[in-house]
Image: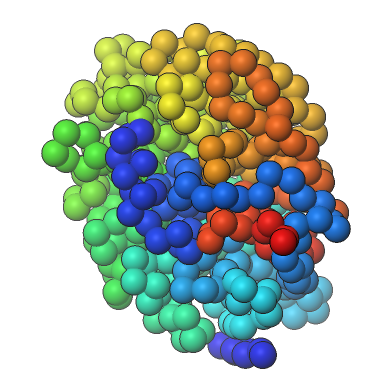
Amino acid sequence: MSVRTAPGVALALAAVAAAHAGEWPQFRGPTGQGHAPDEAVPLTWSETDNVAWKTPVPGRGWSSPVIADGLVWLTTAVTDRETGTSLRLLSYDAESGHAVGDVEVFGIADTTLLNQKNSFASPTPVIDSGGERLFVHFGAQGTAAVYPNGEVLWRTRFPYTSQHGNGGSPILHDGLLIVSIDGYDTAFLVAVDAETGEERWRAVRPAPISQAYSTPLAIRVGQAEQIVNVSAFRASAHEPATGNEIWRVEYPGGFSNVSRPVHGHGLVYLSTGFNEPVLLAVRPTGTGNVTNSEIAWRLRRGAPLTVSPILVGKELYTVTDSGIATCIDALTGEIRWQHRLGGNHSASPIHAGGRIYFQNEEGVTTVIEPGVEFEQLARNELDGSTLASIAVSDAALFIRTGTHLYRIEEQH
């Protein structure tokens, strides 16, 4: 190890309100559903406008920024053809952009990407509620807990074989780090003790199995909590303490799932993935196989493949990989509008300052007004590619490109 130091809708909204404005602790923010605290974030920016700072990021990685205690954290992979790949955790001062920490968590011999669009460092870290530890996941290459000073508390591995490398991010729930593992050779949802890294439970998926890259979501249904996990050919909900399955829906044609589910209006919204993309609205109140009993509606036209949907009010918003945005009545599945945003899309949208921000892979962010009619408010462009999702902290947007990290903030 080396360290360098340098100079549900109501439930979701309640969680956002309770979160400190400076915290963005996991993929898709405080609720895991893309909602930022209600702050006056910038509407417009460019390379020369509303950029508080721009700092270079070494290596290659598509993990999204996470933020706590005035620090921005990312993972990256620094590859050397002779020595292999160093999987690293980086930190930056949120106010100045100065690099603060750079620690190697794992070293691997691999140097060749399984998918040229992916990276060795695509899952987003997660920070515990006290900001005392960060948890990083590099797919089959390893999972670890790291103190903010760079000391590694524990390391573990869940080996599996995947066609495209790593993708899904870990989550924290009641002292457990929960990770979804979906490969050709093995597939399971696993929980480890956040203090020790020791496995607490494992929910093995029955055959058939295949690759998937989704991030689980913790939800509350009545007085009970569930961990909703989207995987190849099925999505399921599990008891957080035991991993026991509560309910599942099956979709035999869907695999390589990427988007994270969202929850609200008594429904879980999830995408069935590639081959036969369908957006499903599922009532999470049943038990066992609820495929024929608890699916409230299905949408095939405009169903997302990679990007997670976002729920704002009574509308659900999605965007396809090719940039077709869709606004859907969240209760009925009726399409309100569809509009071509342009570009290719991998990043998941956010809702901040009363607006929705869609970022494409070419560095362009389209900002829209939520509503049943399409209304574009701004179109902003930065240099470089953008596959990581935007993070929000203290009225600023944090955007990772292929080479840099930006703080976008109103400049007075």
Camera-side residue of 5 and 205: 5
Camera-side residue of 339 and 286: 339
Is residue 282 positioned above or below 206 on the image?
Answer: above
User: Is 370 positioned to the left or the right of 134 in the image?
Assistant: right
Say if residue 82 shows up in the picture.
yes
Is residue 362 positioned above or below 107 on the image?
Answer: above
Residue under the point 56% across and 16% down: 372
Residue under the point 51% across and 33% down: 310
Quarter placement of the C terminus: bottom right
Q: Tell me how many marks there are.
A: 0
Image spot of residue 333 (x, y percent): 46, 13
Image spot of residue 199 (x, y percent): 29, 64
Residue under the point 42% across and 66% down: 127
Which corner quadrant of the image does residue 300 belong to? top right
Which corner quadrant of the image does residue 174 belong to? bottom left
Image spot of residue 313 (x, y percent): 43, 27
User: Is 410 positioned to the left or the right of 308 in the image?
Assistant: right
Say if residue 178 shows up in the picture.
no
User: Is 13 positioned to the left or the right of 286 in the image?
Assistant: right
Residue under the point 71% across and 28% down: 376
